[in-house]
């Protein structure tokens, strides 16, 4: 969230962060947003119990009232119902700490290390009803080191997340993405010369 707010301060950035919403009243992100002069709102989920759609209808009402065009999920650790996702089809993006379609869901770094992968990373994607399955907008990768722990790997992946989320939002907000057969195509230049091989023989 902070990376998006910082990026949007640039005069040429094509999106404006106008609202930060949390389902937890004392979430740290609300204070950070307020410090940056951004409006905040809380739509608590607890009063709705297990009625997820009722909570999301209130959330949707809040977004519409503030004339929101795009929704960026950042640390919003709730599965969204098909009803809500449909309302924001093509207008809601998320970042996931893995190179999708590998390692959907939780504990991505632990699972990557257990499998012995040599490259790991993060993915920004459009949100669809199926968890972590939407069209991929952008990905960034890091090498996995032999002495990595879930924490050290997570820290390097977080650095990638902070780089690619603002860039992915820039593409979407400026109309440089289109979806064809559930694949996201962009007008951005391909990284044809950016090859990451791990481990690298010296």
Image: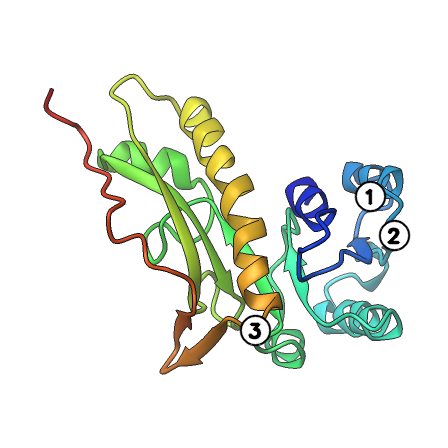
Identify which residue is drawn at 87% across, 37% down: 35
Q: Where does the image place residue 71, in percent across and percent down from the top left?
A: 68, 64
- Residue 4, compared with residue 146, is above or below; it is below
Q: Earlier in the sequence, mark 3 or mark 2?
A: 2
Q: Earlier in the sequence, mark 1 or mark 2?
A: 1
Q: Quadrant of the C terminus?
A: top left
Left or right relative to 83: residue 39: right
Q: CA distance from mark 1 to mark 2?
A: 7 Å
Q: Secondary structure at mark 1?
A: helix
Q: Which residue is mark 1?
A: 33
Figure coloring? rainbow
User: What's the mark number on residue 40?
Assistant: 2
Left or right relative to 151: residue 6: right
Determine which quarter of the picture holds residue 6.
Answer: top right
Q: Where does the image place residue 23, in percent across and percent down from the top left?
A: 79, 53
User: What's the mark number on residue 129?
Assistant: none
Q: Where does the image place residue 98, in percent across and percent down from the top left?
A: 40, 46
Left or right relative to 191: residue 8: right
Q: Earlier in the sequence, mark 3 or mark 1?
A: 1
Q: Which residue is mark 3?
A: 175
Q: CA distance from mark 3 to mark 2?
A: 26 Å
Q: Look at the numbered discs 1 and 2 and tell me whether their residues touch, using CB distance below 8 Å.
A: yes
Dot in front, 3 or 2: 3
Q: Mark 1 Cα within 10 Å, few/some/many (few <14, many 20+)?
A: many
Q: Where does the image place residue 84, in percent across and percent down from the top left?
A: 67, 75
Identify which residue is drawn at 70% across, 61% down: 15
Identify which residue is drawn at 31% across, 52% down: 191
Q: Secondary structure at mark 2?
A: strand
């Amino acid at each position: 969230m902070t990376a998006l707010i910082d990026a949007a301060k640039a005069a040429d950035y094509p999106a404006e962060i106008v609202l930060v919403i949390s389902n937890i009243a004392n979430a740290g992100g609300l204070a950070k947003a307020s410090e940056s002069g951004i409006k905040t709102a809380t739509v608590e989920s607890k009063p709705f119990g297990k009625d997820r759609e009722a909570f999301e209808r209130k959330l949707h009402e809040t977004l519409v009232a503030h004339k929101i065009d795009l929704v960026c999920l950042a640390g919003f650790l709730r599965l969204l119902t098909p009803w809500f996702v449909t309302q924001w089809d093509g207008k809601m993006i998320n970042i996931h700490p893995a190179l999708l379609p590998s390692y959907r869901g939780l504990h991505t770094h632990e699972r990557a290390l257990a499998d012995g992968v040599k490259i790991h990373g993060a993915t920004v994607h459009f949100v669809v009803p199926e968890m972590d399955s939407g069209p991929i907008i952008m990905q960034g990768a890091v090498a996995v080191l032999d002495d990595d722990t879930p924490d050290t790997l997570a820290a390097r992946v977080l650095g990638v997340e902070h780089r690619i989320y603002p860039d992915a939002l820039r593409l979407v907000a400026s109309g440089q993405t289109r979806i064809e057969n559930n694949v996201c195509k962009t007008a951005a230049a391909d990284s044809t010369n950016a090859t990451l091989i791990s481990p690298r023989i010296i």
